[in-house]
Image: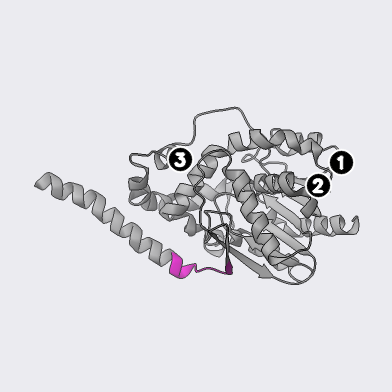
């Protein structure tokens, strides 16, 4: 009896705390935009500004509010559609558990964009969002006027052992138990330090976590989607990377020269070599965080793409 009581407390207390925390997080960080159902998946997005269409695809783990500073820079000149990727923020996840997951996410993004506009947009993708943007243009190049990838993931890297939390979350036996109990406690104590590696000198800007609604990632279903995306990314890139050289649309590649999250030699520089007509912009002093620290540079490149059309 005492053992059962102890087990109930060990599981019940963190489970209750997780449910309380989910409600609190969603109250503090409610949906910032609108919803559309695309192929039976509820997609969340925000539209701001007016002018030529620009699509923003955020990094991992994050949501469309990662681009708040960039949206402020763009909204006076462009119609900005910032999208919560499937499974992140307030967009529902997809069931696909294989490397085809990235391709299916791109199809959902494409379906959402086509529901909103018939114009050919410029697509901007950061990090994992860059991988998603590449999948989008590989499949639907004729529907897009230009591509900007920022600190992107683009190519399969040398295989290694996945990060321990991903292995725990994806485990069919105890993964859901972890995400619904101890993951919240662990995440709340590490979320700020986890973001540090994206920024120069390992220092996250003041209030960054709150300003970008980063705590949404700590919800169980979002964590599960995050882990599944991450565990399938390497193979997903391997499926699409041979198609990059065939692209003919305008492509700009922006890379932080101190980026350790998506190393340039494996991703941005290799992508530039394979897309012979692409433009490579090297940015200093930003590490993995060009959209957060130098959003005006992305606006400049959007303007150049439109001018050269």
Labels 2 and 3: the sequence-earlier one:
3
Residue at 50% in and 69% down: 30
Measured Cα–Cα span from mark 2 to mark 1: 7 Å
Residue 301: percent from left, percent from top: 81, 55
The reply to whether dot 2 and dot 3 touch (C-beta < 8 Å) is: no
> Disc 2 vs disc 1: Cβ atoms closer than 8 Å?
yes
The quadrant of the image that shows the C terminus is: bottom right
Q: Nearer the viewer, residue 143 or 88?
A: 143
Q: Which residue lies furthest to the left in this view?
A: 1
Q: Residue at x 74, y 61 (%)?
A: 54
Q: Mark 2 points at which residue?
A: 251
Q: As drawn, is 3 to the left or to the right of 203? A: left
Residue 133 is left or right of residue 247, and the answer is left
Q: Around disc 2, counting alpha carbons within 10 Å, would you say few (fewer than 14), some (14 to 19), or many (20 or more)?
A: many
Residue position for label 3? 166
What is the span of residues highlighted in magenta in the rendered image?
A: 26-35
């Amino acid at each position: 009896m005492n053992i059962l009581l102890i087990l109930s407390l060990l599981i019940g207390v963190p489970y209750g705390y997780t449910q309380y925390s989910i409600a609190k997080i969603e109250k503090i960080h409610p949906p910032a935009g609108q919803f559309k159902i695309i192929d039976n998946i509820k997609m969340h997005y925000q539209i701001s500004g007016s002018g030529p269409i620009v699509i923003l695809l955020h990094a991992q783990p994050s949501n469309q509010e990662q681009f708040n500073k960039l949206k402020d820079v763009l909204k006076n000149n462009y119609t900005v559609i910032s999208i919560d990727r499937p499974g992140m923020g307030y967009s529902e996840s997809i069931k696909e558990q294989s490397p085809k997951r990235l391709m299916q996410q791109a199809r959902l993004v494409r379906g959402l964009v086509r529901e909103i506009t018939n114009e050919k947009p410029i697509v901007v993708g950061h990090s994992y969002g860059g991988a998603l943007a590449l999948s989008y243009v590989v499949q639907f190049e004729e529907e897009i006027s230009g591509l900007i990838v920022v600190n992107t993931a683009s190519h399969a890297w040398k295989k290694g052992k996945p990060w321990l939390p991903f292995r725990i979350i994806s485990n069919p036996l105890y993964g859901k138990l972890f995400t619904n109990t101890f993951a919240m406690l662990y995440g709340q104590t590490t979320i700020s330090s986890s973001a540090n590696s994206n920024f120069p000198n390992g220092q996250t800007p003041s209030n960054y976590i709150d300003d970008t609604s980063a705590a949404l990632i700590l919800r169980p279903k979002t964590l599960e989607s995050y882990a599944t995306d991450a565990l399938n990314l390497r193979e997903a890139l391997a499926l699409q990377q041979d198609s990059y050289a065939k692209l003919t649309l305008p492509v700009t590649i922006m890379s932080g020269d101190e980026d350790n999250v998506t190393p340039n030699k494996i991703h941005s520089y290799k992508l530039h070599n394979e897309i012979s007509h692409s433009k490579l912009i090297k940015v200093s002093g930003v590490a993995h965080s060009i959209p957060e620290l130098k959003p005006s540079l992305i606006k400049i490149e959007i303007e150049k793409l439109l001018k050269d059309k």
